[in-house]
Amino acid sequence: MNAILHEMWHTWSNGGEVMLAMALLSLVMFGTAIHLLMSLKYRGISGASDGMLRTWVARPEQAPSRIQELIRYTQDEVGSLLDIEGRFREVEATKVTKVDRHLAFLNVLVISAPLLGLLGTVLGMLLTFKAIGVGGSSTSDVIARGISEALVATQTGMMLAIPGLIMATIAKRRRHEYVAFLSRLEGITLRHFRPQFRGITRFFTPDDFKRSTSDFCNAHGQTVLS
């Protein structure tokens, strides 16, 4: 174990000054990727059948805990089909837009990793050329250090970019699955509530009208005339 740590430190120290920037970049990049993947973790939800979604819409208490709040929000106190559509647009504007911002930031970090490696390569080659121009007894050592910095920085940049790109691709796929799930849930919710609405406004039965009138009169201290 100590030998492995010593080898890692030796490789790290040979990477030059750009390695500190890469360390900070890796922390931010992997932290952002893990947070994004965890926020899009919906086990078995994106692959739920239409029958299961219809059951969840009809009885939200049977839905998974992370979906119950979403279903109740799109159903509570809606007065028309347009209200339901508006609720789903609000969910997309808050949830999906936030995911898109994190995805864009993660893509920038992934692209920055090989660019920082390229910067380390340039700095290492500049050190090498400077040693060749100056000459002296320590020229070979400086040249070796410059080449080492160039190679290690490039290698580290690639090693950071490849897993970051994989995680960004997985997050993007989960984002598309979540958007498709919202579209399916919206369609099933609209079909479920359509019999209760006439056109785009809610259809009230006589019992519903009496109940709403009674609630209004009770709230204002009036008597209901039958």
Image (cartoon, helix red, strand yellow):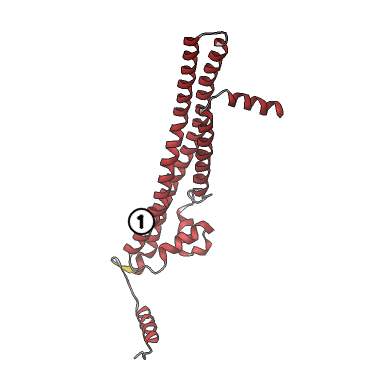
Relative height, residue 191 to residue 9 (above, below): below
The answer to whether residue 202 is seen in the rendering is yes
Instruction: Tell me where residue 197 appears, x and y as whole percent.
Output: 33, 68
Task: Name which quarter of the figure residue 207 lies in.
Answer: bottom left
Give whichever of 183, 219 is nearer the camera.
219
Q: Is residue 79 left or right of residue 158?
A: left
Q: Residue at x 43, y 32 (%)?
A: 111
**Is residue 226 visible in this depiction of the protein?**
no
Residue at which label 1 appears: 89
Q: Is residue 159 above or below residue 87?
A: above
Q: Tell me the kind of residue under disc 1.
A: Arg
**SS at badge 1:** helix
User: 152 and 80: which one is in front?
Assistant: 152
For residue 140, above or below residue 209? above
Q: Quadrant of the N terminus?
A: top right
> How many numbered markers are drawn?
1
Residue 167: x, y in percent? 50, 38
Quick one: label 1, few (<14), some, or many (20+) residues within 10 Å?
A: some
Q: Choose between 72 and 131: the one closer to the eye.
A: 131
Q: Where's residue 159, x and y in %?
A: 53, 28
Position of 207 with respect to 46 (left or right) is: left
View extreme (left): residue: 199
Residue at image x 46%, y 18%? 126
Q: What is the x, y in percent for residue 16?
A: 53, 25
- Furthest residue to the right? 2
- The residue positioned 47% from the left and 38% from the top of the image is 168
Quadrant position of the C terminus in the picture = bottom left
Q: Nearer the viewer, residue 135 or 79?
A: 135
